[in-house]
Image: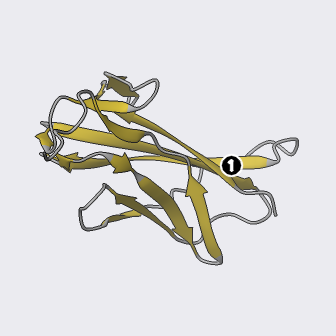
Amino acid sequence: MARQAMLLVADEIYYNLHGKAILQGIYSGDIFIPTNPSQAAQLIFFFAAETDISEPFRSLLAEVILPENDPVRTPIPIQWPAVFPPSERTKISVKWPVMIPTPTLRPGKINTRLIHESGELIVAAPWIIQMTPPERAN
């Protein structure tokens, strides 16, 4: 069984009339904050997971842990295709956003994973970096 996952982090998400997700403000690297702590309006964690068509996901739970924050866990609905896929198709994917409203951002590693019925997929996420060094005590 070859399962894999990836993640995009963005500031905003919109959906058009055809159900397409439009991400804006996608972070191409780490998230930089001016002070510790900082507040953001929201962060969108857009997860994508892929599995063999012969072993589809039965359950998925997204987990995001921002530094020094409690975990945010969101169940991801499993949607089966409306039509039977072509015989040459070997993989199916699931894509789902997790929104965290007004997160408090502190420097450190963001931990993300997808928990499924038989284990978990660790998903690479950016770090939060403070732009100015913290003040030193004299």
Give the amino acid type for the residue marked by disc 1 in the picture: Ile
Residue placed at 35% from the left, 60% from the top?
65
Percent x, y for residue 12?
25, 29
Pick out the residue farthest to the right: 88
What percent of the width, then of the height, locates residue 123?
Answer: 55, 52
Outermost bottom residue: 118
The answer to whether any part of residue 83 appears in the image is: no
Above or below for 22 versus 53: above
Seen as rendered, the residue at the extreme front is 138
Residue 25 falls left or right of residue 5: left
- Say which element carries label 1: strand
Q: Is residue 71 above or below residue 89?
A: below
Q: Quadrant of the C terminus?
A: top left
* Rendering coords of residue 40 (x, y %): 15, 37
Name the residue rendered at 53%, 69% in the picture: 115
**Residue at point 16% right, 42% down?**
36
The colour scheme is: secondary structure
Give whichever of 42, 116 is nearer the camera.
42
| Residue topped by disc 1 | 92
